[in-house]
Amino acid sequence: MPWAVGNGVFKGVPPQSVAALTVLVAAAAMAILMSQTEAVLAPLWLLGMAAGFTLQRSRFCFASAFRDIFLFGSSRIMRGVLMGLGVATIGFAIIMYNDVPFPAFGALPREAHILPVGMTAVTGGLLFGFGMVMSGGCVSGSLYRMAEGYVGSWVSIAGGHSGLGIPVSDLELVVDHPGFPRTQGLAAVYL
């Protein structure tokens, strides 16, 4: 089926291909612009674009992983979630072993911020789960659905930023962290 995008170079090219080429050129231009500001920004920008593309194409969402098991009998996404958790757990254990070779002595790295588990963690988990049900997906699912144009996901991400940023803006563990200078305050928390 011939597509009539224009009379010029793109005649007969599907509109999706033209849009994809436009996005790729804009992303490359943005990476070049970012690299002139600070060299590390360009690879991080491209890595973020690749991660977003992968999330969207794989439909990777923690909430849908559980939902698909019960509604459709499909465990494909859940296997990916479990594999990712396994890799992250092993990686975290290796990193912590290098930072804390003998945790039995009670010596923890300053950046660990290990907090006691209590009712606040249980309450936060229940509220987070309720929010996932209400928004129709987890944070990663809301991010790629936001890019697809779902207004509910925009509201969900805005609520997530408010919920994460406002309560922790005064905590020392966020504001006094070397990566978050005190002069940036709440803006650093959001970034």
Image: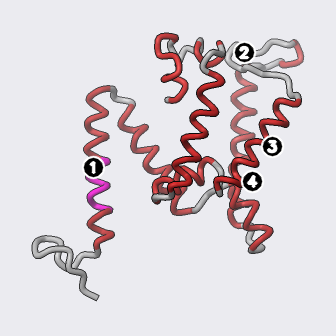
Foreground: disc 3 or disc 4: 3
Q: How many marks?
A: 4
Where residue 163 appears, as percent x and y from the top left, is 64, 33
Q: In the rendered structure, which amino acid carries the disc numbered 4?
A: Leu
Viewer-closest of 57 and 84: 57
Return the disc, 3 or 2, that comes first in the chain's sequence: 2
- Residue that numbered label 2 is attached to: 109
Label disc, if present, on residue 44 of the rendered structure: none
Foreground: disc 3 or disc 2: 3
Label disc, if present, on residue 26 of the rendered structure: 1
What's the magenta region?
20-27
Return the disc, 1 or 2, that comes first in the chain's sequence: 1
Q: Measure the alpha-carbon separation of dots 1 and 3.
A: 40 Å
Q: Measure the alpha-carbon separation of dots 1 and 2.
A: 42 Å
Q: Measure the alpha-carbon separation of dots 3 and 2.
A: 30 Å
Is the residue marked by circle 1 packed among few (<14), some (14-19), or many (20+) residues within 10 Å?
few
- Residue that numbered label 3 is attached to: 126
**Residue at the extreme bottom:** 1
Return the disc, 4 or 2, that comes first in the chain's sequence: 4
